[in-house]
């Protein structure tokens, strides 16, 4: 495969394979001992749709390990942002968690994914359901003006085990509201609904349970989800995707794709 063919070594220990972008890390921020975000330079020719993912790796081996990462920055941003978990002994993340500004990151040239606005039919309200690092594609979408052109209301739910794991999302929403461009679109229309399952927090519980009990809708002051007005996007663990998908289907929503837009879309959070 093209991306695994290696060029002559740039310097000892660094292999830049052909056919991938070699970008520079510009910023790294650690939130907990398990979570961090980082930003890289953006190749001028690289285009993507907000919500898509791309394969990234490190130039630390002749055959680099690549993993799919949702792009967390919006498509207009001049840099690319990622939000990552640190997996003990994870083939990529055990090295990735040690990157610093100035380091090189490899990114394959083509982004893809189903968690995109094009795969959703028009509606009044879009729910973005996330757990853990599954918030990453929504970090891109809630900063994209197109989201607010397509929907009147944007509801971002984020469920984590512990309170500290909410920090990235809380910072994201706070910064967004203060943003001169997108902040104006988002104010009063973006609702952030964080919940925690294993520590005391104002809203506790899995999002699926909070929907089943009606608490989510009562807290937001909206009617229960229905296929006429509501659209959904889901990103989290396999179990969370399955259970949330089942609930949305129970409300009468139909899964969409790029080829056939529907009333909800699903993407798994690609981490290991
Ligand atoms: P819980 O603490 O009850 O397992 P994980 O780190 O396992 O991916 O979990 C992240 C968050 O997603 C946790 O708050 C977890 O709740 C929640 N979660 C895990 N599985 C599901 C599921 N099947 N449906 C909804 N939420 C889930």
Image (spheres, rainbow, N blue to C red):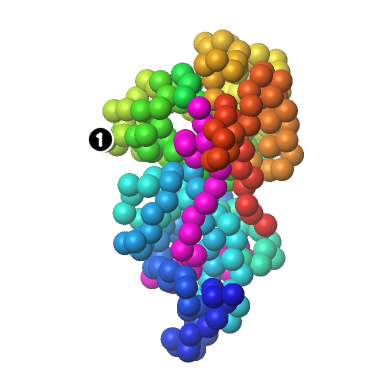
Q: Secondary structure at mark 1?
A: loop
Among the 4 quarters of the image, the one containing residue 148: top left
Span shown in magenta: 93-121
* Residue 104 in magenta stretch: yes
Whether residue 255 is situated above or below residue 267 in the rendered picture: above
Drawn side of residue 242 relative to residue 52, left or right: right
Quadrant of residue 115 within the rendered picture: top right
The x and y percentages for residue 124 are 46, 19
Q: Is residue 174 visible?
A: no
Q: Of 43 and 199, which appears nearest the observer?
A: 43
- In the drawing, does residue 64 fall left or right of residue 244? left
The x and y percentages for residue 166 are 54, 38
The quarter of the rendered structure image containing the N terminus is bottom right
Residue 25 % position (x, y): 41, 65
Whether ligand 1 has any atom under 8 Å from the Cβ at mark 1 is answered as no
Q: Which residue is mark 1?
A: 180
Q: Residue at x 29, y 28 (%)?
A: 184
Residue in view at x 36 percent, y 28 percent: 149
């Amino acid at each position: 495969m093209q991306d695994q063919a290696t060029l002559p070594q740039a310097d000892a220990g660094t292999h830049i394979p052909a056919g991938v972008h070699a970008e520079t890390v510009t910023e790294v921020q650690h939130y907990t001992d398990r979570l961090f975000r980082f930003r890289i330079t953006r190749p001028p020719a690289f285009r993507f749709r907000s919500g898509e993912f791309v394969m990234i790796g490190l130039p630390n081996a002749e055959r680099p390990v690549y993993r799919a990462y949702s792009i967390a920055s919006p498509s207009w941003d001049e840099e690319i942002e990622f939000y990552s978990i640190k997996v003990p002994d994870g083939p990529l993340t055990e090295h990735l968690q040690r990157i610093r500004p100035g380091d090189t990151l490899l990114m394959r040239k083509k982004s893809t994914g189903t968690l995109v606005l094009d795969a959703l039919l028009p509606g009044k309200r879009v729910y973005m359901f996330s757990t853990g690092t599954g918030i990453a594609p929504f970090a891109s979408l809630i900063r994209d003006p197109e989201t607010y052109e397509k929907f009147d209301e944007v509801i971002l739910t984020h469920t984590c085990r512990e309170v500290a794991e909410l920090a990235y999302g809380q910072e994201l929403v706070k910064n967004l509201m203060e943003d001169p461009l997108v902040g104006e679109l988002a104010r009063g229309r973006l609702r952030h609904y964080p919940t925690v399952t294993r520590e005391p927090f104002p809203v506790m519980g899995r999002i699926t349970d909070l929907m089943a009990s009606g608490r989510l809708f009562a807290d937001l002051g909206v009617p229960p989800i229905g296929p006429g007005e509501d659209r959904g996007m889901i990103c989290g663990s396999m179990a969370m995707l399955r259970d949330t998908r089942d609930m949305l289907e129970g409300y009468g929503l139909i899964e969409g794709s790029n080829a056939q837009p529907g009333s909800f879309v699903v993407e798994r959070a690609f981490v290991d």
